[in-house]
Image: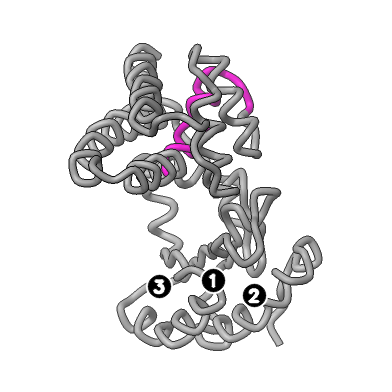
């Protein structure tokens, strides 16, 4: 039986859900598996049972198409249990990619739980210059994409509301790293992240917090006309786009 690690740090429901999955995955790839990590909301307080996906990061010594092909059945089985398709990377890919994916590796480095094998994430070094450029690209890119998406869904209130939720969710890791670029240690809980970034960049934190409440509880966003709320959200992203260019 493979030696799994840190399962005792998970809530019992989550532990029960992934233990069998991990054993099957390790039996399938055997010595080719270097590490398996749990990442994302399942590691911390933002995990919501039966709603949040369970995100796994699997590192293989060698990664070829055949390795993905033989994983198809177990991945399909896991998806039915809210275990997202794992991120598969080779060990070499990690050591040569921190410059182009600085946020992704920082997020995993700071919010991961080693479940099997070697901890390859903790020793990683991320260049702050790469991080700033990536944050700028992400914020300006999201500003372009959300405007384009609005043209597709703007006639429907629910469409705009869903657009705000998706945009805010995908922007959160960038906000955490903007805090880091300002010399502060970013929080883990989303409410605290939005408060931090709003204080550092003079933003309206209530815009972000209202979207978060709507995501968690399906509340009507701040009881406002969704068009006006969308305009407020765009204004915050525009301010960030200008600010990150000047960091």
Q: Any mark on residue 83, and which?
A: 1
Residue 174 in the image, given as x and y percentages of width and height: 45, 34
The nearer-to-camera label among 3 and 2 is: 2
| Residue at 62% over, 63% down | 118
| Residue at 43% over, 67% down | 88
Label whose residue precedes the other's in the sequence (1 or 3): 3
Residue 181 in the image, given as x and y percentages of width and height: 50, 22
Q: Judge the density around disc 3: few (<14), some (14-19), many (≥20) Cα neighbours within 10 Å.
A: some
At mark 1, the secondary structure is: loop
Q: Is residue 181 magenta?
A: yes
Q: Any mark on residue 187, and which?
A: none
Residue denoted by label 3:
62
Residue denoted by label 2:
18
Residue 207 in the image, given as x and y percentages of width and height: 49, 27
At mark 3, the secondary structure is: loop
Answer yes or no: do the residues labelled 2 and 1 have beta carbons within 8 Å? Answer: yes
Q: How far, Cα to Cα, is label 3 from label 2?
A: 24 Å
Residue 138 in the image, given as x and y percentages of width and height: 33, 35
Q: How far, Cα to Cα, is label 1 from label 3?
A: 23 Å
Label whose residue precedes the other's in the sequence (2 or 1): 2
Q: Which residues are magenta?
A: 170-185
Q: How far, Cα to Cα, is label 2 from label 1?
A: 8 Å
Taking depth in this image into account, of 221 and 59 the one nearest to the observer is: 221
Q: Quadrant of residue 91?
A: bottom left
- Report if residue 93 is visible in the image: yes
Q: Which quarter of the rendering shows the C terminus?
A: top left
Q: Judge the density around disc 1: few (<14), some (14-19), many (≥20) Cα neighbours within 10 Å.
A: some
For residue 45, side relative to residue 169 (left or right) = right
| Residue at 62% over, 53% down | 112
Taking depth in this image into account, of 11 and 2 the one nearest to the observer is: 11
Q: Judge the density around disc 2: few (<14), some (14-19), many (≥20) Cα neighbours within 10 Å.
A: some
Q: Quadrant of residue 233?
A: top left
């Amino acid at each position: 039986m493979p030696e799994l690690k840190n399962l005792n740090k998970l809530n019992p429901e989550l532990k029960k859900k992934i233990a069998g999955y991990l054993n099957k995955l390790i039996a399938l790839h055997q010595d080719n598996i270097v590490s398996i990590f749990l990442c994302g909301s399942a590691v911390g307080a933002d995990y919501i049972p039966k709603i949040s996906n369970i995100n796994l990061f699997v590192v293989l010594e060698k990664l070829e198409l055949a390795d993905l092909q033989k994983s198809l059945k177990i991945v399909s089985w896991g998806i039915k249990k809210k275990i997202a398709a794992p991120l598969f990377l080779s060990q070499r890919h990690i050591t040569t990619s921190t410059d182009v994916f600085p946020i992704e590796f920082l997020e995993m480095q700071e919010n991961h739980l080693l479940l099997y094998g070697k901890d390859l994430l903790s020793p990683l070094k991320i260049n702050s210059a790469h991080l700033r450029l990536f944050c700028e690209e992400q914020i300006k890119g999201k500003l372009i994409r959300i405007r384009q998406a609005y043209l597709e869904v703007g006639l429907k209130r629910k469409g705009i509301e869903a657009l705000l939720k998706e945009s805010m969710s995908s922007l959160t890791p960038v906000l955490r790293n903007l805090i880091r670029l300002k010399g502060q240690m970013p929080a883990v809980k989303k409410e605290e992240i939005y408060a931090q970034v709003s204080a550092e960049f003079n933003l309206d934190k209530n815009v972000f917090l209202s979207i978060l409440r709507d995501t968690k509880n399906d509340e009507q966003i701040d009881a406002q006309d969704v068009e006006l709320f969308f305009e407020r959200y765009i204004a915050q992203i525009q301010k960030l786009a200008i600010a990150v260019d000047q960091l």
